[in-house]
Amino acid sequence: MEYLIPKGRHITAHEGDYVKRGDLLVDGSPVPHDILRILGIEALATYLVSEIQQVYRLQGVRINDKHIEVIARQMLQKYEVTDPGETILIRGEQVDRSEFEHANKEALKRV
């Protein structure tokens, strides 16, 4: 496989290294879209909570994880429709996860 490395980033993996799905190949912070695409929604939620907690801790503020988890869950609850296919959804529309899954199930029943 080949990956394009952004200019200014340094490769942390070397020839012969064993890497698994989700391992960082370059220095710097991971891109949240990549975490979602590669590792899934749970890994993204965990990443967001830890990064937000890190900012608050640097300011000397202690917040229980559950409060940040609620915010992260709300952030990750909306889906943007990119291909409506045979559903009643519209391209570009933002819908709740439950509505998205329901529309997909209904479309699959018709096939």
Image (cartoon, rainbow, N blue to C red):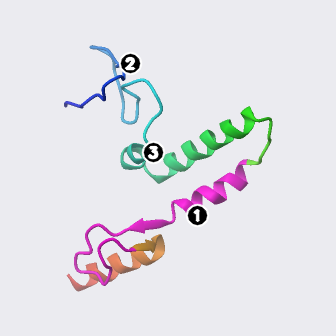
Q: Position of residue 70 (x, y in %)?
A: 65, 59
Q: Secondary structure at mark 3?
A: helix
Q: Amino acid at mark 2?
A: Thr
Q: Which residue is mark 1?
A: 74
Q: Is residue 62 above or below residue 17?
A: below
Cα–Cα span, label 1 and label 3: 16 Å
Q: At x 31% / y 29%, what residue is drawn?
A: 6
Q: At x 24% / y 31%, what residue is drawn?
A: 4
Q: At x 42% / y 40%, what residue is drawn?
A: 31
Query: Which of marks 2 and 1 precedes in the sequence?
Result: 2
Count of numbered marks = 3
Q: Which residue is mark 3?
A: 32
Cα–Cα span, label 3 and label 2: 19 Å
Q: Position of residue 5 (x, y in %)?
A: 28, 28
Q: Which mark identifies residue 12?
A: 2
Picture quadrant of residue 56: top right
Classify the position of the C terminus by image quarter: bottom left
User: Are the residues flagged by discs 3 and 2 in contact, CB closer than 8 Å?
Assistant: no
User: Are the residues flagged by discs 1 and 2 in contact, CB closer than 8 Å?
Assistant: no
Q: Which residues are magenta?
A: 65-93
Q: Is residue 80 magenta?
A: yes
Q: Residue furthest front?
A: 8
Q: Is residue 85 above or below residue 74?
A: below
